[in-house]
Image (tube, rainbow, N blue to C red):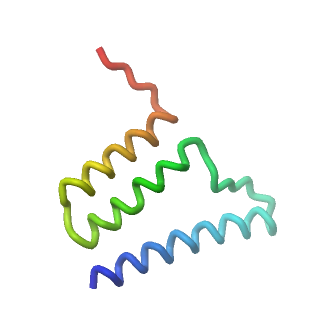
Amino acid sequence: MRNKISNILWGLIFIIAGLGFAGNVLFGWNFDLFFPGWWTLFIIIPCFISMIRNGFGFGATLGFIIGVLLLLRNYVEFSIG
């Protein structure tokens, strides 16, 4: 069952990307797959899929949190202290 969910998630990701590119060509949308911090998706997506398949393990959850924080670094200004 968990493998089926991850396959559905991967399928939705590819469908959304395909719709974005098709919208660029057909309707002149301004869809760009590469945005500031796009590389953090290589951390976030596998950790998210691992959390769905195996539950909230320490490594997957920590990786997910770190990936989200790295992504947010491009959009939110953090001030510590």
Please tell me whether residue 65 is drawn above or below residue 14 in the rendered image.
Answer: above
Residue lying at 61% horizontally and 66% vertically, measured from the top left? 17
Quadrant for the N terminus, please: bottom left
Residue lying at 45% horizontally and 26% vertically, measured from the top left? 77
| Residue 38 coordinates in the image, percent (x, y) | 55, 49
For this rendering, which residue is in front, 26 or 53? 53
| Residue 60 coordinates in the image, percent (x, y) | 27, 57
| Residue 8 coordinates in the image, percent (x, y) | 43, 79
| Residue 21 coordinates in the image, percent (x, y) | 71, 66
The residue most toward the front is: 59
Q: Is residue 4 left or right of residue 25?
A: left
Quadrant for the C terminus, please: top left
**How many tags in the picture?**
0
- Quarter of the rendering containing residue 55: bottom left
Residue lying at 65% horizontally and 71% vertically, measured from the top left? 18
For this rendering, which residue is in front, 9 or 62? 62
- Quarter of the rendering containing residue 80: top left
Q: Is residue 38 left or right of residue 81?
A: right
The residue most toward the top is: 81
For this rendering, which residue is in front, 27 or 24? 24
Residue lying at 37% horizontally and 20% vertically, measured from the top left? 79
